[in-house]
């Protein structure tokens, strides 16, 4: 007889008394996979169905998967709408039997069964609020990979993509990672870079959102997996700047008023370090006209620098700094401040302004508790000092001008102390500029200036240093 759902649940909870009932007839290994009934009538949930649900569930709990198969398959084929555990336990049963057999025909049967099971789950439980159709498609994509390996990556990728589109940042981490893996495998076969890039962006953005969620207990895992998919993308070849230009040149031109699209393209280019591309510049410039953001301002700064307009580049970086502060993206703030410092030193020879930006970047990184990145700023300051002539080019002035090298080397030493990543570069500069210190004879000729152990380097530098 047909049972109402509440009665089924109650009976399922009380089934230990039924465990002595007759077991269902064994299903032969060669039994073909049966498709779910396509008629409109719901399969009838009988007392025997409820009994068998209990039987296979208890066996799965005890990891007795071979014993669980017969009652599970009976329920799966006669009343697939009886309970969600048909599919959660069924996946474990089929996986265990698949791993246990070496018979190719049996492996193929079980693989087909694993895929069909997810389709049937969608039919009967696809409206489940916690595990909807989109979630189940992710399970189907994972099943393709687990049971077929590399032979059905296109099918896996299609399911995984649909799953992530539906679940977004609520997707399982493994679904996000395997989407990139499957898409990369397909890309290597068909060369469709646009599809691979799109899949990567979708998965990477979802992982970034999970990693940045302080309330997500798996945030650290998501962060590590994002590093993994980023690395896959980096080595794929799809991130080649010229290839990106082929894909996105028309997209930028067709979306000059679509801020979301322009911003996504600009972020992708910056992520893969293709910030010298004219397509990147065009996306940033168009986005900046619509609504200035730190991303668009930074892109416009790079564009201006490429054109040799360094004053304009720094003006854009000033905008990027302010906007990034509003967005609380302080690591980006530190980068923009450093970039401005570099252009002021290297291209404009504005050493006072260069030091100002470098010190600002150091302060930002200090606020974040980050040492890495500070070293390059101290090196910029040291180079500014070493490039400065504070005194006239007379006999006395030529000697006093050498004191800037003491101050410069102080900064190079500081650079490697706070940031070991720049140690080799700092040591090279120390070796180079220490050769130009005032000699003993020169200091002897100016006893009033070089009395004691310290010397005050005046002018805009305005720092005390030790006499060496």
Image: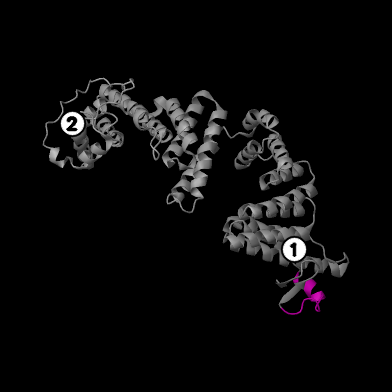
Q: Quadrant of residue 78?
A: top left
Does residue 223 sit above or below 437 in this rendering?
above
User: What's the residue at 67%, 28% (across, down)?
Assistant: 250
**What color scheme is it?**
one colour
Q: Residue, x 48% and y 27% (percent of image)?
A: 186
Circle 1 residue: 436
**Depth check, front residue: 454 or 56:** 56
Q: Earlier in the sequence, mark 2 or mark 1?
A: 2
Mark 2 — residue?
48
Above or below, 35 relative to 456: above
Numbered-mark total: 2
Q: Residue 139's x, y, as percent?
A: 38, 34
Residue depth check, mark 2 versus mark 1: number of the one nearer the observer: 2
Q: Is residue 467 magenta?
A: no
Q: Where residue 246 sits in the image (x, y, percent)?
A: 65, 28
Is the residue 434 above or below the residue 249 in the image?
Answer: below
Left or right of 202, for residue 251: right
Between 141 and 429, the one lying in front of the other is: 141
Depicted 421 relative to depicted 90: above or below: below
Q: Secondary structure at mark 1?
A: helix
Q: Which residues are magenta?
A: 439-452
Crowding near the residue tagged with mark 1, few <14, some 14–19, many ≥20 C-alpha atoms within 10 Å = some
Position in image of residue 307 (x %, y %): 78, 41
Q: CA distance from mark 2 to mark 1?
A: 95 Å
The answer, for residue 261, to whether it is visible in the render is: yes
Q: Residues within 10 Å of mark 2 (few under 14, many from 20)?
A: some
Quadrant where the image shows the N terminus: top left
**Where, by quadrant of the figure, is residue 72 drawn?**
top left
Query: Between 135 and 39, which is closer to the camera in this rendering?
Result: 39
Q: Is residue 448 magenta?
A: yes
């Amino acid at each position: 007889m047909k049972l109402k759902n509440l009665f089924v649940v109650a009976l399922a909870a009380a089934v230990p008394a039924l465990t002595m009932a007759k077991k269902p007839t064994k299903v032969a290994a060669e039994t073909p996979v049966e498709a779910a009934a396509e008629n409109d009538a719901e399969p009838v949930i009988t007392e025997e169905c409820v009994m068998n649900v209990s039987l296979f569930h208890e066996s799965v709990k005890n990891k007795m998967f071979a014993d669980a198969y017969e009652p599970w398959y009976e329920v799966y084929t006669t009343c697939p709408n009886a309970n969600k555990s048909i599919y959660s336990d069924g996946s474990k049963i089929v996986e265990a039997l698949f791993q246990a057999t070496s018979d190719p025909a049996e492996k193929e049967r079980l693989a087909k069964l694993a895929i069909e099971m997810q389709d049937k789950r969608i039919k009967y439980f696809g409206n489940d609020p916690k595990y909807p159709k989109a979630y189940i498609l992710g399970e189907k994509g994972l099943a393709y990979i687990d049971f077929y390996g590399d032979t059905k990556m296109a099918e896996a990728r299609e399911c995984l993509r649909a799953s992530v589109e539906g679940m977004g940042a609520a997707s399982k981490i493994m679904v996000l990672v395997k989407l990139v893996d499957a898409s990369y495998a397909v890309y290597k076969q068909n060369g469709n870079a646009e599809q691979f890039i799109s899949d990567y962006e979708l998965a990477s953005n979802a992982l970034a959102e999970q990693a940045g969620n302080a309330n997500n207990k798996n945030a650290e895992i998501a962060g590590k997996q994002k590093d993994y998919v980023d690395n896959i993308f980096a080595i794929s070849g799809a991130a080649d700047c010229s290839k990106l230009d082929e894909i996105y040149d028309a997209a930028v031109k067709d979306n000059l008023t679509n801020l979301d699209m322009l911003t996504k393209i600009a972020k992708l280019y910056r992520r893969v370090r293709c910030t010298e591309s004219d397509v990147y510049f065009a996306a940033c410039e168009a986005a900046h006209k619509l609504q200035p953001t730190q991303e668009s301002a930074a892109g416009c700064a790079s564009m201006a620098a490429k054109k040799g307009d360094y004053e304009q580049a720094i003006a854009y970086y000033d905008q990027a700094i302010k906007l990034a502060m509003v967005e609380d993206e302080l690591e980006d703030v530190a980068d923009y401040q450093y970039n401005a410092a570099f252009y002021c030193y290297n291209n404009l020879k504005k050493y006072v302004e260069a030091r100002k930006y470098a010190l600002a970047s150091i302060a930002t990184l200090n606020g974040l508790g980050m040492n890495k990145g500070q070293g390059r700023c101290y090196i910029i300051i040291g180079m500014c000092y070493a490039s400065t002539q504070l005194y006239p080019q007379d006999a006395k002035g030529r000697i006093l001008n050498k004191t800037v090298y003491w101050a410069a080397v102080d900064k190079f030493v500081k650079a490697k102390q706070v940031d070991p990543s720049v140690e080799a570069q700092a040591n090279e500069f120390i070796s180079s500029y220490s050769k130009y210190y005032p000699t003993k004879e020169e200091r002897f000729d100016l006893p009033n200036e070089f009395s004691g152990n310290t010397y005050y380097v005046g002018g805009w530098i305005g720092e005390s240093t030790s006499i060496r």
